[in-house]
């Protein structure tokens, strides 16, 4: 990326209505976050999509969603739970197709416990990947069909490379890597993981999506960019080396901090 990158945002449809002018002033990528609850996916979500599409008239960036994640992991050993997870992922992709979305966030199954124990059991690493394939194979196929990327986001991941190995194991252009800066910073500060820019370098051009949030290295804060202790110069320096054009999605707990996040990164000369 040679020019200053353009920052997008993760918003609910209601927050998009509030920040619509900002999201349309440049080709800012958008991630809608209304569609992860089971109650929404099992219900009539079409009016929400309809409202979003109207609000997106004139929008020039890419659109995607945060997929379902609460209450399960994509490596479940329970065959009945696995069927529910398969269903949820396909429901999310149905929403993506209706929106014209090009990405859906999927949470990494790798835990802090895994970092210390996967090599404590024979073939545990491969078994974890096999379980993910049993759960995700239908979703990967469907994502390929509709031109959507499943981007696997680090959650507890202490090892920046484990979920990269998982993504590549599918052998599909529909499975790529995501980074959440606050999650990586938490892992760095609390579990001894590498700093955030190392996660970016590890992913390299497999990186197609990033959640930008500031934090303190202790918890998952989702603060306004510039309010925490993440070294943004190192993060954007690493991003500047990439050619994969990742979606740069500001993901805040308080959406009112979106304009300040963009302004703070612009003031540092890092983004617009």
Image (tube, grey):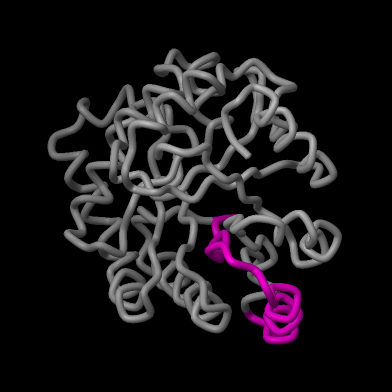
Of 166 and 116, the residue lying toward us? 166
Q: Is residue 66 inside the magenta stretch? A: yes
Q: Is residue 231 inside the magenta stretch? A: no
The x, y position of residue 180, in whole percent, is: 52, 38
The x, y position of residue 181, in whole percent, is: 53, 32
Q: Where, quadrant-wise, is the C terminus in this rendering?
A: top right
235 to 105, vertically: above or below: above
204 to 81, vertically: above or below: above
Identify the image quadrant of residue 15. Answer: bottom right
91 to 151, vertically: above or below: below
The x, y position of residue 73, in whole percent, is: 45, 53
Q: Which residue is at the far left?
A: 122
Of 77 and 225, the residue lying toward us? 225
* Point 74% across, 85% down: residue: 47
Q: Where, quadrant-wise, is the N terminus in this rendering?
A: top left
* Point 57% across, 78% down: residue: 99
Of 253 and 247, the residue lying toward us? 247
The x, y position of residue 163, in whole percent, is: 32, 42
Identify the image quadrant of residue 223. Answer: top right
* Point 81% across, 57% down: residue: 19
Give the residues drawn in magenta, as a range: 42-71
Of 13 and 90, the residue lying toward us? 13
Number of marks present in the image shown: 0
Q: In this view, does 237 lie to the left or right of 57?
A: left
* Point 58% across, 30% down: residue: 182
Q: In this view, does 158 lie to the left or right of 254?
A: left
């Amino acid at each position: 990326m040679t020019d200053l990158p353009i920052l997008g945002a993760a918003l609910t449809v209601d927050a998009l209505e509030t920040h619509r002018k900002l999201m349309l002033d440049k080709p800012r990528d958008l991630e809608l976050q209304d569609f992860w609850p089971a109650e929404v996916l099992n219900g009539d979500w079409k009016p929400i999509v309809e409202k979003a599409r109207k609000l997106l008239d004139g929008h020039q960036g890419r659109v995607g969603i945060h997929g379902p994640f609460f209450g399960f992991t994509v490596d479940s050993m329970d065959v009945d739970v696995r069927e529910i997870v398969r269903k949820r992922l396909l429901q999310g992709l149905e929403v993506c197709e209706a929106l014209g979305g090009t990405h859906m966030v999927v949470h990494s199954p790798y835990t802090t416990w895994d970092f210390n124990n996967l090599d404590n059991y024979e073939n545990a690493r491969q078994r974890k990947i096999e379980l993910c394939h049993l759960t995700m194979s239908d979703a990967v196929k469907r994502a390929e069909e509709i031109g959507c990327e499943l981007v696997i986001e680090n959650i507890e991941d202490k090892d920046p490379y484990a979920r990269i190995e998982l993504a590549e194991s599918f052998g599909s252009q529909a499975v790529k890597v995501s980074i959440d800066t606050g999650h990586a910073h938490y892992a760095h500060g609390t579990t001894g993981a590498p700093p955030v820019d190392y996660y970016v370098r590890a992913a390299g051009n497999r990186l197609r999506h990033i959640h930008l949030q500031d934090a303190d290295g202790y918890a998952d804060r989702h603060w306004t960019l510039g309010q925490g202790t993440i070294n943004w110069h190192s993060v954007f320096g690493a991003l500047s080396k990439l050619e994969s054009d990742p979606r740069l999605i500001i993901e805040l707990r308080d959406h009112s901090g979106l304009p300040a996040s963009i302004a703070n990164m612009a003031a540092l000369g890092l983004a617009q």
